[in-house]
Image: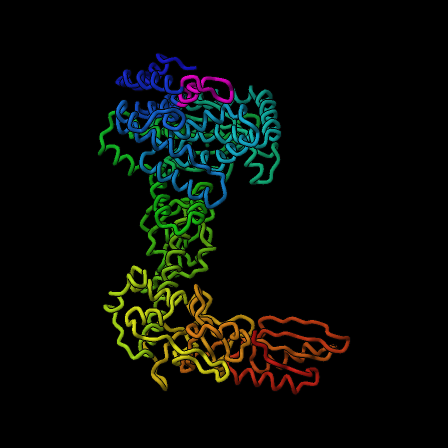
């Protein structure tokens, strides 16, 4: 266990101006607060916060972070209160300790919804002060180092949580050493046999190759020194988890891996990095495709370095990482390497440094998704996408660098520039050539986005094509907004017709005055719910004019609908509310398109075709569903007259569309009969969407056809010629 003076000495080594009295006070307070508490290992509980503080001294963090580490379990596990911590150590430290206390309660491997909500809370806490994450990561690292004392079931849960959440977060914040150790400890807990196998292979390989590693280090140092570059060179092997994940990802054996050993070359300046690279490539052959320049294009966690792989002495492949000492600090400690997290930085300096940090930029973007996401599960999906993907770097025509997850396409690129660019995107050029929007982008691609003036609604199908959380969130928002506008437009026209039937005047002012009576916040909310079928137009009318009585019941015998509430159903794409189309009674509403993501749709199992008399049924949550008047499904709505709408076809437009119809045929079981049936349909320009066949006897088959036809006349012509055929004994239309 670290002694009191040892902890102070560790901090004083990197911060001569440390507040020793504050550290001593926190040490003593935490030790007394935890008293006789013990851990699963049998050690005094105080040893845990002390080790967490010790880990943070390796990252050279400020006094507040060290004190927060010492106190981070006091509020949760002892009688200490937040106000007591504020009083003794100051409000900033109290806030850090309180944030850590809240994080301790989060279960990040629970059911998806709970996990998503807890991850949301975690990132929100981090966004207020990233030191909360640093202390939490140090806390998790010490817990993982002592995980073998924990019962097996709990051990697996903690290891899974570490591998899923905390290790990737450490990587995103640039704390690579911590990430690798967390991954390796979790790997050992979850897959002990695989971990032991790889560890033994590594040990054997290191013993066998130790002379070769020494030779590569000496040859490198000598060659660089001869060219006037003083370099610090060290060899290191990949961690077992890194090796295992690469073997899994690439489906290769241990022997096929070529970069198990890597050499870090630390030089004095950026210029010397590139000079050293040239010397190395002159001395040894470079492996094609293995060079990466993260100095000119840093990773999103601020990592900067040159990577290359060469074939060195003994034909051994060697991966080299060439960087300056400052770059190495960022590679090791991530955002903890910035002066932002040292004592003495002013607020302006902290703000400026935060803006310069790409890791902070990722965190800010993630927090935007937190605030904009509609559901916790959606947020979890986006965040995990961002956490687990390697990066690809592309450029705009003006040279702006855009970093995205590997596998991203031009649609992702457009949304990374700005949401409005993504929404108006209709095409792209990659390196000057027109390419499909789904083209996967590669490092160094120059991407130009082609936009359409007035285009604001992206196709909903894009959601399944993109890879970034930002793009998916924006597409979902735009789709939801468009559907909401569709429902609101439909609802407004239904409400206006409702007022007409009641012979009452409608105005937004009158409706706004009775919103509290409807328990709604806005007129748009009312209209949208009416359009969705979740509120009835009659209820809106009676809210404004309480004296109005309800509609009379429907008479199914005469097929007469209450009040003849008219909608005009069209066959061309036209915006709702673009203007009423003239009709006999002047009450028709132009609703066109009938797509699955709109407020009006056809009933399944046969639907309706132009020429049928049709009925609209308001379905809660779905809007209006169109049925032919002969559909047996309508019987379900006989006792709900308020949901019936009189709808009419709009066939004024020149564009010809197909509508779904279902036929049931009984046909002779003989060779060529199906060919004759499909031939008749083809002659009439009908389109077969689906076909089903059942053998009713050895002589006859029953066939169900799903057709696309233009109108009722077109359908009747097909049915007439099918009945005339020698192979068809009966043909009838099916609804429902």
> Which picture quadrant has residue 448?
bottom left
Q: Residue at x 29, y 71 (%)?
A: 546
Who's the residue at 36% across and 13% down the image? 4
Q: Is residue 620 left or right of residue 21?
A: right
- Count every numbered label the image shows and give the total: 0
Q: Position of residue 34 (x, y in %)?
A: 40, 20
Q: Which residues are magenta?
A: 35-52
Q: Nearer the viewer, residue 174 or 555?
A: 555
Q: Is residue 597 magenta?
A: no
The quarter of the image holding the C terminus is bottom right
Near-viewer residue (91 or 471): 91
Q: Is residue 243 left or right of residue 115?
A: right
Q: Quadrant of residue 592?
A: bottom left
Residue at 30% from the left image edge and 31% from the top image edge: 95
Residue 57 x %, y %: 37, 21
From where the camera sits, is residue 586 visible? yes
Is residue 490 among the parts visible in the rendering? no
- Name the spot of residue 692 as percent of width and height, x first: 65, 71
Q: Quadrant of the N terminus?
A: top left
Residue placed farthest to the right in the image?
Answer: 698
**Residue nearest the viewer, comparing 225 with 464:** 464
Majority secondary structure of magenta residues: loop
């Amino acid at each position: 266990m670290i002694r009191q003076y040892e902890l102070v000495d560790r901090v004083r080594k990197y911060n001569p101006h440390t507040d020793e009295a504050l550290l001593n006070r926190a040490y003593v307070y935490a030790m007394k607060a935890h008293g006789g508490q013990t851990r699963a290992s049998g050690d005094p509980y105080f040893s845990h916060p002390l080790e967490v503080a010790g880990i943070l001294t390796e990252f050279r963090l400020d006094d507040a972070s060290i004190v927060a580490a010492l106190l981070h379990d006091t509020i949760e596990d002892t009688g200490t209160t937040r106000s007591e911590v504020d009083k003794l150590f100051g409000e900033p430290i109290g806030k850090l300790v309180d944030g850590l206390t809240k994080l301790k309660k989060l279960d990040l491997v629970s059911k998806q919804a709970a996990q998503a909500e807890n991850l949301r809370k975690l990132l929100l806490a981090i966004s207020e002060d990233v030191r909360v994450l640093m202390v939490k990561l140090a806390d998790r690292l010490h817990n993982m180092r002592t995980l073998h004392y924990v019962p097996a079931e709990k051990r697996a849960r903690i290891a899974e949580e570490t591998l899923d959440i905390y290790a990737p977060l450490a990587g995103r914040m640039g704390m690579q050493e911590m990430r690798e150790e967390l991954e390796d400890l979790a790997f050992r807990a979850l897959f002990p046999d695989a971990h032991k196998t790889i560890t033994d292979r590594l040990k054997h390989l290191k013993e066998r190759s130790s002379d070769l590693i020494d030779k590569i280090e000496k040859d490198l140092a000598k060659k660089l020194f001869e060219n006037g570059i003083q370099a610090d060179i060290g060899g290191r092997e990949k961690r077992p988890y890194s090796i295992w994940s690469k073997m899994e990802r690439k489906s290769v054996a241990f022997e096929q891996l070529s970069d198990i050993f890597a050499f870090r070359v630390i030089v004095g300046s950026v210029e010397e990095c590139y000079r050293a690279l040239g010397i190395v490539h002159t001395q040894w052959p470079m492996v094609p495709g293995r060079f990466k320049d993260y100095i000119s294009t840093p990773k999103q966690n601020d990592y900067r370095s040159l990577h290359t792989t060469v074939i060195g002495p003994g034909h051994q492949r060697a991966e080299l990482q060439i960087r300056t000492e400052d770059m190495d600090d960022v590679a090791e400690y991530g955002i903890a390497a910035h002066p932002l997290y040292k004592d003495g930085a002013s607020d302006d300096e902290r703000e400026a440094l935060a803006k310069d940090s790409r890791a902070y930029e990722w965190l800010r973007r993630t927090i935007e998704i937190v605030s904009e996401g509609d559901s916790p599960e959606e947020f979890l999906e986006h965040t995990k996408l961002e956490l687990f993907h390697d990066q690809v770097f592309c450029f705009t025509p003006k040279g702006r660098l855009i970093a995205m997850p590997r596998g991203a396409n031009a649609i992702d690129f457009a949304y990374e520039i700005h949401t409005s660019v993504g929404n108006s995107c209709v095409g792209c050029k990659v390196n000057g050539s027109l390419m499909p929007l789904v083209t996967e982008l590669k490092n160094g691609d120059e991407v130009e986005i082609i936009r359409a003036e007035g285009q604001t609604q992206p196709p909903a199908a894009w959601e399944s094509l993109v890879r970034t959380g930002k793009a998916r969130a924006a597409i979902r928002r735009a789709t939801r907004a468009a559907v909401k506008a569709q429902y609101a437009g439909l609802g407004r026209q239904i409400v206006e017709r409702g007022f007409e039937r009641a012979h009452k005047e409608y105005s937004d002012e009158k409706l706004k005055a009775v919103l509290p009576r409807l328990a709604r916040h806005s007129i748009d909310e009312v209209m949208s719910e009416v359009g969705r079928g979740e509120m009835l137009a009659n209820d809106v009318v009676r809210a404004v004019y309480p004296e109005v009585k309800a509609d009379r019941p429907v008479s199914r015998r005469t097929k007469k609908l209450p009040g003849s509430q008219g909608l005009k159903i069209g066959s061309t794409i036209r915006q709702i509310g673009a203007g009423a189309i003239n009709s006999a009674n002047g009450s028709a509403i132009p609703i066109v398109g009938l797509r699955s993501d709109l407020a009006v749709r056809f009933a399944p199992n046969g639907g309706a075709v132009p020429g049928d008399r049709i009925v609209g049924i308001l379905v809660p949550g779905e809007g209006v569903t169109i049925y032919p008047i002969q559909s047996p499904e309508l019987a379900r709505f006989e006792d709900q007259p308020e949901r019936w709408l009189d709808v009419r076809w709009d066939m004024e437009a020149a564009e010809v569309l197909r509508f779904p119809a279902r036929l049931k045929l009984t046909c002779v079981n003989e060779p060529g009969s199906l060919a004759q049936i499909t031939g008749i349909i083809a002659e009439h320009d009908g389109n077969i969407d689906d076909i089903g066949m059942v053998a009713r006897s050895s002589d006859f088959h029953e066939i169900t056809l799903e057709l696309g036809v233009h109108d009722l006349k077109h359908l009747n012509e097909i049915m007439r010629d099918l009945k005339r055929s020698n192979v068809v004994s009966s043909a009838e239309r099916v609804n429902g």
